[in-house]
Image: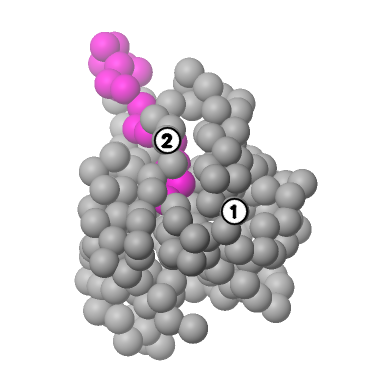
């Protein structure tokens, strides 16, 4: 795979299963509604984005992980899986999309390692630490929605308050308007001052493929 361009997509946590208890299920729906999400990202969301971007890469890889944080709350499985994948692709130009909790997985996998082959990292509504920028990445792009309560809640819980905006010479922060957490992986139309792109997928493609 030498001299090829590869995109890795790191998923976030999978939606919680349906509770048999009506009380628990209704409570879950109420909490998710307050967090601007109906259920979260399902696998189909990642597959659609991967298909859209596949024409711009030699290979698009979804990190092998089912997103089950109930079974594996430590996230050791996807972190180790990502480390192994990056070892295999050490001579390849790599772009990475980290979605939601996928941002945390990415940072932990690269915590003690510099990989100079990473071209761009695109965070989408992702959990990240503003003080732990990934060395070796040419550009880091942080896309989030100001209406995404799940994004702000998750960052506050996992990384601490104030980690919403990233800082650094190679960092771009893009705050979108009026998009829920779930919407960030759907090809929604966007009308926002300063953005010429007509849809989310077009925005993500341009951020990754244009210098």
**In-front residue for pair 135/20:** 135
> Is residue 186 something that shows in the picture?
no
Say whether residue 125 is left or right of residue 41.
Answer: right
Give the overall secondary structure of the magenta segment.
loop
Q: Nearer the viewer, mark 2 or mark 1?
A: 1
Coloring basis for residues? one colour
Q: In which quarter of the image is the N terminus?
A: bottom left
> Is residue 92 something that shows in the picture?
yes
Say whether residue 108 is left or right of residue 45.
Answer: right
Q: What element carries label 1?
A: loop
Q: Which residue is drawn at 67% across and 57% down?
A: 115
Q: Mark 2 points at which residue?
A: 64
Q: Which of marks 2 and 1 is nearer the N terminus?
A: 2
Q: Residue 8: x, y in percent?
A: 44, 53
**Relative to 173, residue 58 above or below:** above
- Confirm whether the magenta stretch covers residue 22: yes
Q: Mark 2 and mark 1: span between their CA atoms?
A: 18 Å
Q: Residue 94: x, y in percent?
A: 51, 61
Q: Residue 81: x, y in percent?
A: 54, 35
**In-front residue for pair 20/109:** 109
Q: How crowded is mark 2: few (under 14 residues within 10 Å), some or many (20 or more)?
A: some
Q: Residue 47: x, y in percent?
A: 26, 48
Which numbered circle lies on residue 108?
Answer: none
Q: Mark 1 points at which residue?
A: 90
Q: Which residue is drawn at 40% across and 88% down?
A: 194
**Relative to 141, residue 206 above or below:** below
Say whether residue 174 is left or right of residue 17.
Answer: right
- Confirm whether the magenta stretch covers residue 4: no
- The residues colored magenta run 9-25
Q: Residue at x 53, y 22 (%)?
A: 72
Q: Residue at x 37, y 84 (%)?
A: 195
């Amino acid at each position: 795979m030498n001299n090829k361009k590869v995109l890795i997509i790191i998923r976030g946590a999978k939606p919680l299963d349906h509770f048999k208890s009506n009380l628990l299920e209704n409570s879950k729906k109420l909490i998710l509604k307050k967090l601007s999400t109906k259920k979260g990202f399902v696998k189909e969301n990642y597959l659609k984005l991967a298909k859209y971007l596949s024409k711009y890469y030699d290979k698009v890889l979804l990190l092998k992980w089912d997103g089950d944080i109930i079974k594996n709350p430590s996230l050791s499985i996807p972190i180790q899986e990502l480390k192994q994948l990056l070892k295999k692709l050490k001579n390849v130009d790599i772009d990475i999309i980290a979605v939601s909790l996928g941002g945390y997985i990415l940072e932990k996998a690269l915590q003690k390692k510099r990989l100079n082959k990473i071209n761009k990292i695109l965070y989408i509504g992702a959990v990240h630490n503003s003080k732990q920028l990934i060395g070796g990445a040419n550009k880091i792009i942080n896309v989030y929605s100001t209406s995404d309560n799940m994004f702000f809640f998750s960052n506050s819980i996992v990384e601490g308050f104030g980690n919403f905006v990233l800082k650094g010479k190679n960092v771009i922060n893009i705050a979108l308007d009026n998009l829920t957490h779930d919407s960030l992986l759907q090809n929604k139309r966007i009308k926002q001052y300063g953005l010429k792109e007509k849809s989310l997928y077009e925005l993500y493609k341009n951020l990754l493929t244009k210098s």
